[in-house]
Image: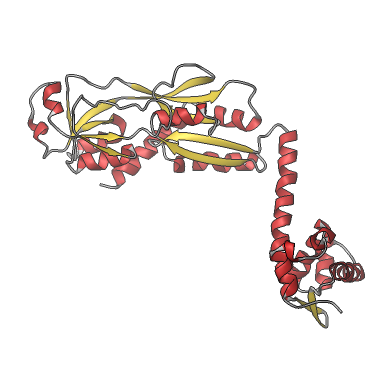
Amino acid sequence: MLDTSESFVRIIRNPSLSNGPVMRRLTLDGLELLDAIARSGSFSGAGVLLNKVTSTVSYAVAKLESDLKVGLFNRHGPRVELTPAGKELLEAGRVLLLAADDLECRVKRIADGWESEIRISSDTLIPPIMFSSLLERFCTEAHGTRVKLMGEAMTGVWESLQDGRADIILAVGQGPSGGGFRTKNVADLQFAFCVSPQHPLAEWGGIVPSEEVRKHRMIVASDSARHLPARTVGLLRGQQIIAVPDMRTKYALQVAGLGVGFLPHLFVKSALQRGLLVEKQVEEPKPDDQVLLAWRTGDPGRALKWWRDALGDADVVPNFLNRASQAWVAEY
């Protein structure tokens, strides 16, 4: 007699409880058959889905149940329903079917020159949501290559490339020495030293000397580097600081009057026009910087080439920066 008790459920959850290789008697065809019956609700319906006659489906089910020595279906005329063991097998089987499909796609992609995964790291100034339009195009063309988006700050972006955690990056400022990667300038950034209208430096006339700046708290974006030397921009020796995880938080705290510091001019242009911030000339200004697209040297796969070309387009990253700056403005 076929076992329809909970014993098979326990074996599925913990194969060590079985006295024999129960799961080895399963095939992907058998799991596809089970899935088709569950979706259609009958053997005849599964036959339509699988392009098989009903008698072939019935025979295959009977053989599967006999091999497993487990009842998978309760029959109610033409309609069938899964037993508890059948439901457990279906749930686990669908995971296996998805894994098999994924493996097949990965093998085909690799054979066609597409990487199984592409990892993209960008400075927090350009949040991952900015990639949405490119992601839609890529996923259509790449036939299943997985995409992993990461956000890092300053040197941390370069470190993700150097450590092999990322395949291609968008970083603000030059990378570490030593080479091993290629770069392309995709945007330029100018910086403004900003304070809130209520801050004492707002009323300072002319160029603010460094000694005066040093007296006031600086808001700084923390570098996310784990191993490479962290970079600090605009901080004077001995100056009190508040360290924050990204430039957007830095902007918000400076608007709130909690400190001073350099911010990308593009991102604060509207705030300056609306009087939320005041730009001051300082004795030690921050030089202009670049947004660099970088990738490791070597023979790139098709996914890396795709993103290198897409992000290297003259208008793409400037558009990212404009959209990101508008998100800042929308909060105030």
Q: Residue at x 91, y 67 (%)?
A: 56
How many callouts does the rendering have? 0
Q: Which residue is most to the bottom?
A: 76
The percent coordinates of residue 289 (x first, y second) are 35, 22
Residue 48, above or below 208: below
Could you tell whether 224 is left or right of 208 in the image?
A: right
The percent coordinates of residue 284 (x first, y second) are 20, 19
Judging depth in this view, the residue of 109 and 131 nearest the camera is 109
To which quarter of the image does residue 21 belong? bottom right
Residue 36, above or below 82: above
Residue 123, above or below 290: below
Q: Is residue 170 visible?
A: no
Q: Is residue 79 visible?
A: yes
Q: Residue at x 12, y 30 (%)?
A: 215
To which quarter of the image does residue 44 belong? bottom right
The percent coordinates of residue 81 (x first, y second) are 75, 77
Could you tell whether 258 is left or right of 301 in the image?
A: left
Q: How is the image coloured?
A: secondary structure
Could you tell whether 214 is left or right of 290 in the image?
A: left
Could you tell whether 76 is left or right of 84 in the image?
A: right
Q: Quadrant of the N terminus?
A: bottom right
Residue 221, above or below 6: above
Q: Which residue is most to the top?
A: 178
The percent coordinates of residue 303 (x first, y second) are 62, 33
